[in-house]
Every structure is written in structure tokens, then in C-alpha cells.
Image (cartoon, rainbow, N blue to C red):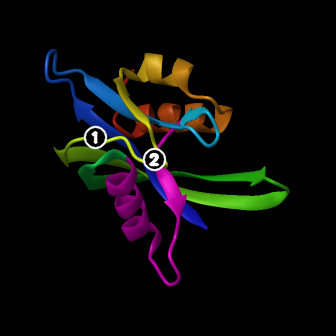
Amino acid sequence: MAAGCVLWRRSPRAGEVEIALVHRPKYDDWSHPKGKLKRGEEPLRGALREVLEETGYACAPGPPLPTAHYVANDRPKLVHYWAAEATDGQFVPNREVDRLLWLPPDAARVRLTHERDRELVDAFRDVLHMA
């Protein structure tokens, strides 16, 4: 089991909502920050830990988003997600994540590699009541 967040902030320039996407060199993909839970770890706690580890940002959790179910390497995956607002931090490239982009939702949707991640942007818009 895994957990992650659609991490967002208000643009420092225009005040518009931006979503953080991470690039994982191991998979050469753009996705939302997420990762495996530690033994006995609650999904929300794991999601916040993974966001901090992958992006360098602490965040305030918001509403839950749909749980993703998919198969990777012939194994079923279950990933719990939340919307979470970035509160403080700074990205530093690391072994797991070498790039982070802050993009408006439309641009984030286009940049994401997997359709399941695009669907999370749509759900995020719904919970934030964005058109």
C-alpha cells in the first residue's frame, strides 16, 4: 500500500493555484509525490512523509481524493491520495526525484505521464470547486 498528495500552492506571482509535479528518473515519468507506507503507518501520515521526502515541502492535508488502483510490474497497487497545501519548504534534487515543477492545473494535467494521475487533477479541481 502507498499514499501521496496532490500538492498545491498559490502562485507567488499571480495568486493562482499551482500543482507540484515530481520527475522520477528511475521511471522517467512525471507524477504526484507518493510512496510506500512503512509497516503500521497510517496512510495520511505516510502521504505527508512522502511529500516532504520527495519535494522538501511540509504541507497541510485537505480533503481525501480518490484512491488509485492499478497494476505495476504484475502486482496490484493501491495508493491513497489527499489534496494538500504546501506550507513551507524548498525542493532539493535527490535520488528519487530530480526535478519539481509548479504548474497550473491545466498544464499539470498535460505534463503528467499517467492517465490515473490526470484523473486526480480533475478530482482535485472538484474538491477545490475550481471550474
Q: Residue at x 37, y 27 (%)?
A: 101
Q: Quadrant of the N terminus?
A: bottom right
Q: Front-most of 111 and 28? A: 28
Which amino acid type is marked by label 1?
A: Phe
* Residue furthest bottom as drawn: 40
Q: Is residue 26 left or right of residue 35?
A: right
Q: Residue at x 25, y 52 (%)?
A: 59
* Residue furthest front as drawn: 95
Q: Residue at x 30, y 42 (%)?
A: 92
**Which disc is residue 118 wearing?**
none
Q: Is any part of residue 39 visible from this angle?
A: yes
Which amino acid type is marked by label 2?
A: Pro
Q: Nearer the viewer, mark 1 or mark 2?
A: 1
Q: Residue at x 34, y 36 (%)?
A: 128
Q: Which residue, given by chain and number where applicable, does mark 1 sit on? A: 91
**Which disc is residue 33 wearing?**
2
Tell me which segment is drawn in magenta: 31-54
Q: Secondary structure at mark 2?
A: loop
Q: Quadrant of residue 42?
A: bottom left
Q: Position of residue 91 (x, y in %)?
A: 28, 40
Q: CA distance from mark 1 to mark 2?
A: 12 Å
